[in-house]
Amino acid sequence: MNSFLQHRLTIAGFALVGGIFLQMLYPLQTLIRIPGIPAPMCDSDPNDLDELHAGMKNLINPLIDCKPEFFEESPKSYPIESSVEKYINKAQEEARVDEVGVYYRDLINGPQFGIHQNTFFAGASLFKLPILIAYMRASEKIPGLLDQSVAYEPEKLYDGRTEQTIDPPNPMVPGKKYTLKELLMRMIVSSDNNATKMLTMLNVPANGEETLKEMGVKTSTSGTDLYLTVSSYASIFRILYNATFLTQANSNASLDLLTKVEFSEGLRRPIPANIVVAHKFGERTVDNTSQFHDCGIVYHPTKPYLICIMTRGKNMRNLIDVVADISKIIFDRVNDPSLNEEHR
């Protein structure tokens, strides 16, 4: 064998051994992250399926890396989708709902599906979640921020209160001081519009709309209203679950607030009480058209999943029922896979 050919074969051999070594090393190096270096932000793309996680820590499962080449491609369809589509078609025929958007994702690198997942809906109270995230982000840079207090002065908030169809059960007391942490809790747990308005009026570097852009969540604007899709809003929950934007402590704290939401209709209604659900709902009625949305994470003990449902129609009660019905269809089939056999 001449020296030139021997030299080329030697180089090829080293390259092959080096490649195998790096392939073996890849899982280890993804587990060792340098403090201060954020985790990969693959969460905002609903089509990213394969993820490597550190393991459940309370309500989060920190993301270490996404879409490694050595993972097999995850399935992109699911028999649940057929059941949901059949129900939506029937509900529309019965004039109970005009439009429905659904996004589902198994959070253990499992299947996902979207139905009208690129249709835009008015965000309404769903935008309280990015405000929470913005304040949590700011508190990581400003120690003690959430312990600061401010008095509730209704006369400074529009005409004294902001209109909402589903009122908070315990209204704020005029003149009473509330910490920013308490206002955030009221905004999320009770969906209190007055608490939300107070938070947006404060001179604090915490802007929900800018935070959405930072997270890579796509929105659309019409007048003063922000619109978004089920897949784009679902990505916010995925970012919290993966702890890729806030610290792990603040990601957990945010999801913990979402598990305390007082509104138990819609998404939460069909889920057994012993199963934790972190969710946010939103509602809006303008002229003759109502919208009701509910999105979150259902912490099924073996198959946690992300679900986002948005609806538009004439009757708010019907819309809430439609969301509850779709939630039940999905939960029942996740909980008992044998129900999916008829669609295989």
Image (cartoon, grey):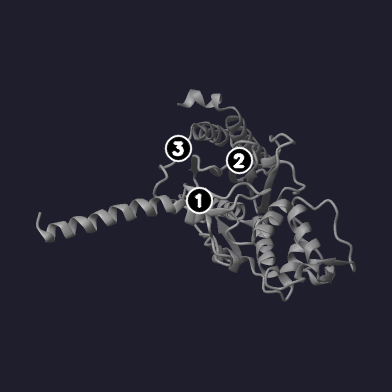
Residue 44 coordinates in the image, percent (x, y): 51, 56
Amino acid under label 1?
Thr
Question: Element type at marker 1?
Answer: loop
| Residue position for label 2 | 304
Q: Nearer the viewer, residue 245 or 307?
A: 245
Find disc 1 in the rendering and name its residue: 119
Q: Amino acid at mark 2?
A: Pro
In 3D space, how far apart are the residues under numbered discs 3 and 2 (Cα atoms)?
17 Å
Q: In the orientation shown, which residue stands out farthest toward the bottom?
A: 203
Q: Is residue 50 left or right of residue 204?
A: left
Vertical order, 36 against 294 (above or below): below
Q: Residue at x 69, y 34 (%)?
A: 270
Image coordinates of residue 212 in percent, x first then y, are 58, 63
User: Contact, CB < 8 Å: mark 1 with mark 3?
Assistant: no
Q: CA distance from mark 1 to mark 3?
A: 19 Å
Between disc 3 and disc 2, whose residue precedes? 3
Question: Could you tell me if the residues under marks 3 and 2 are in contact, i.e. CB atoms within 8 Å?
Answer: no
Question: Separation of disc 1 and disc 2 at Cα?
Answer: 25 Å
Which residue is most to the left? 2
Q: Nearer the viewer, mark 1 or mark 3?
A: 3
Q: Which residue is mark 3?
A: 77
Three-letter amino acid code of the residue under disc 3: Ser
Identity of the residue drawn at 59% across and 69% down: 210
- Quarter in which the N terminus is drawn: bottom left
* Mark drawn on residue 64: none
Secondary structure, mark 2, is: loop
Query: Which one is closest to the eye, mark 1 or mark 2?
Result: 2
Q: Nearer the viewer, mark 3 or mark 2?
A: 2
Left or right: 331, with 8 as reference point: right
Image quarter (top left, top right, bottom left or bottom right) of the C terminus: top left
Task: Count the marks.
Answer: 3
Disc 2: CA contacts within 10 A as few (<14), some (14-19) or many (>=20) = some
